[in-house]
Image (cartoon, grey):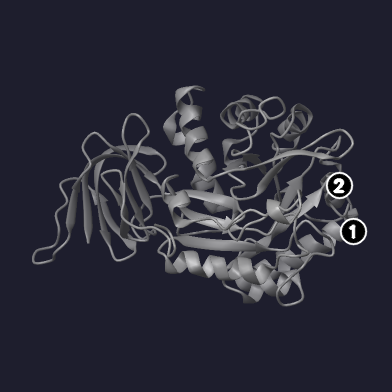
Amino acid sequence: MILIKNCELYTPENVGTRDVLIAGQRIVAIGEHLELPHGVEGKVIDGKGLRMIPGLIDAHVHIAGAGGEGGPASRTPEMQLSHMLEAGVTTVVGCLGTDGMTRNLESVLMKTKALRHEGVSAWMYTGSYQVPTPTILGDVGKDIAMIDEVIGAGEIAISDHRSSFPSPQELIRIARHARVGGMLGGKAGIVNIHMGDARNPFQPLYEAVALSDMKFTQFLPTHCNRNDYIFEDAKTWGKKGYVDITASSYPYFPEYEIKPSKAIAELVKAGVPIEHITMTSDACGSLPDFDEKGNLRRLEMGYPKSIFDEMRDLTVQENMPLQDALKPVTSNVANILWLKQKGTLAPGKDADAVLINDQFEIVHLVAMGTLMVENGKMLRKGSYEK
């Protein structure tokens, strides 16, 4: 058991000073003046002066590596466990990405299982940029319904020179299979959409909705801050559907990208419900810069810590209350993706929690009831990390 006392608790709502009791993998009690049960051994952590927040959920990570746009040597490596812990991330959702040709979903699935064995929580999307999209069992719906770790489809690319330019009918077919697979498997069955740099980028999604009875919320378009015109369109789309902001690419491409923390603040100001906004890192995916002729100029790689840093900046620089700044990386993601044990701190929920100080430094981190970071020191690393 772990008892954390006297911390300022954000569930993500700010509920004041509380004690939090953890047993096994769950939070079992939240209150004042809590003690360990008589005769039960456990660890007591003094949280005075610290804020406890839910473990962050990074719902778009190339956990098994990605990239390759610059040739074989530009393939990115797998994500390491330490990359999650240093970011306050306790849950990830993996995806394949651009390369659905030389990489495969089986590798993403095994990396998902590996992260679970290392003590954190992980799920994945089936599919890739390409349409027809690769699957494990031969159908998007089957993957979602029958494989525990698969919760949706993606990232399917549209409005991008690397996409297969799927027709509205193809998007409808993928979305319908994902939805039915989700119904059968008790999952969200959402379709994660890679948004490219083409003008009027949301048009394929509007057409797919108009030609079917699907809702806007069947899709989760990402990279919505990659340039000024897609961001302006996202302000309209986000009032009916979901908008995902990418955090890791801004430092490399500030001349194009809208800073993620600023983007979230501006979306809310434009009338997009905060509950419709998520923020993910796109970590371990390549961050390519192409010229006007489509030639690759440079290639970078992002990390999960970008969502923690931008969440901090949303509070410090954009003056958004912490309880609201947390939602795009905690409760919103859990609600949209049906990760019912994640995203909030409450009795019965998974014990994923991060304690931070006033400087937004991670002091302690608990994932699935196990103390992973203590007093700023990482207690666990991945199997092959030194």
Q: Residue at x 65, y 73 (%)?
A: 145
Residue 252, located in which quarter of the rendered image? top right
Mark 1 and mark 2: Cα distance apart in space: 10 Å
Residue 186 visible in this rendered orientation of the protein: no
Residue 102 visible in this rendered orientation of the protein: yes
198 horizontally vs 249: left or right: right
- Asked whether the residues under the numbered discs 1 and 2 touch, taking CB atoms below 8 Å apart as contact, a structural biologist would say no
Q: Which mark is residue 34?
A: none
Whole-percent x, y for residue 188 in the image:
63, 61
Residue wearing tag 2: 204
Most foreground residue, 240 or 150: 150
Name the quadrant of the C terminus.
bottom left
Placement of 91 over or under 298, stated as above or below: below
Tell me the kind of residue under disc 1: Gln
Whole-percent x, y for residue 205 in the image:
82, 47
Placement of 107 over or under 379, stated as above or below: below
Q: Residues within 10 Å of mark 1 (few under 14, many from 20)?
A: some
Q: Which mark is residue 169?
A: 1
Most foreground residue, 198 or 218: 198
Name the quadrant of the N terminus.
bottom left
Whole-percent x, y for residue 27 in the image:
31, 58
